[in-house]
Structures are given as C-alpha cells and as structure tokens.
Image: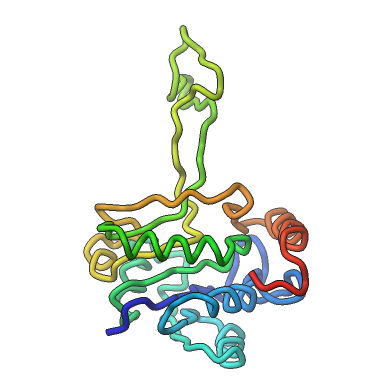
Amino acid sequence: MKKLVAVIPVRAGSQRVKDKNIRAFAGKSLLEHKIETVKQLPVEDIIVNTDSEEAIEIAKREGVSFHKREPYYASSECSNSEFHHYLAQVTPAQNILVAQVTAPLIKKESYLQAIDEFMQSDCDSLMSVRVLKEFIWYQGEPLNYSRDHMPNSQDLPEYVVPTFGLVIVKRDAMLENRSYIGKNPLFYKITQEEAIDIDTQLDFEFAEFMYQKTFSPLENI
C-alpha cells in the first residue's frame, strides 16, 4: 500500500457558487491550480475524487488519477462523517493528504512543512487551523472572559479553528473515527491568507484577488 497519497475532493454541484471548482479562477480553474501545487509534493499518487465529468476530464488532461464518486457521497444528504469514512475506504494508502480546491492560497511550503511534521510526529492526523483570539459571546453570555473582568484583546485565550484546507491523516484512524481529525491530532497553524476558504461568491472574488496579489503569473505555488 502506498505511504502517502493526495486526494483532491471535487463536487459537481455547488449550492452557493455555481461550478466554483472548475470555473475560471486567476486564469485556471481551482482544480487545475490545486493539481499544480500537489504535483510539487512528495506524494505517490494524486487522486481527484469527484462526481463531475468535467473534473474527470481535467484530471485526465493533467495526468493524474481519478475516482468516480458514488452519487450519494456527493449529495447534501451525506454527512461529513459518512464522507470522510467513504473517502478512506476508497483510497488505498497508509496516509492520506486531503487538498481542498476551495483553499487556493495554501502555499507549497506549508504543505511540505506539514508533511514533514506529520511524518516525524506520533500523531494520527494533522489539520490546518486558524487562530481565533476575539471576544466571544453565546446565548447572552461571554464564553472566553467574565463580565466583571474584560481583558485586553491580546490577553484573551487563544483558540484554534479547523480550516479543513490542509489535512493529513492515517487511513486507519480515518476509518475508525469517521473523521479527518483523529484521537491524537496535530494542529498546524496557517496564515490568515492561507485560511481563506471559498464558500460564497464574495469569497470567490476575494480569494481570486488575493491569489493574484500573492502569486505572480510566472510562479507556481
């Protein structure tokens, strides 16, 4: 079984941004950009996991593998737990790197460092996270400070929020936990720019602006 395989999940449908994964984004589709990045990583195979015929054609054109996803696992009825378990089932590898096309600003260097940290640690999963250090309220009460003692913002506790943009996980742990995040996770901090995730049309336009600002046309990620 291969030691490290990269999976690029791509759904045909998008509820908020039509065809966001394969439409033009800074000269190429999000999928093409992500394939270019992952090709520069020490992985033994790259698999586009998709129900989209257009995505399959892109995979063939780019010379990478593909897995035709069963319709249920591309539907809104399928939970994340079900999909993560399914992805592990259909990916023959000891370790799986999940590279989301909706996180186009994650740099090659971040992937390389994350892979190195994962391989050298005893964790069962690595998840990209962004730092959250803000005043948080829930149901009329502050969660991370008390009403009678409001600290300076820099003194607030530091929380981390999974971004799901960069994931490395042992296949066995993914099968057991039905999740990208195992029982012994390593949280890998990424920058605010790298944490940008495309979920809405505004996200798409902002991410494209930031991509063009961050990466020159002659530079691969």
Residue 11 % position (x, y): 53, 73
Q: Nearer the viewer, residue 51 or 122?
A: 122
Quarter placement of the C terminus: bottom right
User: Would residue 201 be found to the left or right of residue 54 on screen?
Assistant: right
Residue 121 % position (x, y): 29, 58
Residue 27: name its quadrant: bottom right
Give the vertical position of 23 relative to 136 (above or below).
below
Residue 215: name its quadrant: bottom right
- Please give the name of the residue rendered at 32% of the width and 72% of the height, measured from the top-left corner: 95
Q: Nearer the viewer, residue 90 or 168?
A: 168
Residue 208: name its quadrant: bottom right
Residue that lies at the very extreme toward the top in this rendered image: 148
User: Would residue 96 be found to the left or right of residue 59 on screen?
Assistant: left
User: Would residue 80 be found to the left or right of residue 101 on screen?
Assistant: left
- Please give the name of the residue rendered at 72% of the width and 54% of the height, measured from the top-left corner: 202
- Please give the name of the residue rendered at 59% of the width and 63% of the height, measured from the top-left corner: 107
- Please give the name of the residue rendered at 36% of the width and 73% of the height, measured from the top-left corner: 87
Q: Nearer the viewer, residue 173 or 52?
A: 173
Report how many numbered discs are placed on residues in the image.
0
Give the colour scheme of this rendering. rainbow
Give the vertical position of 44 relative to 84 (above or below).
below
Quarter placement of the N terminus: bottom left
Residue 13 % position (x, y): 58, 72
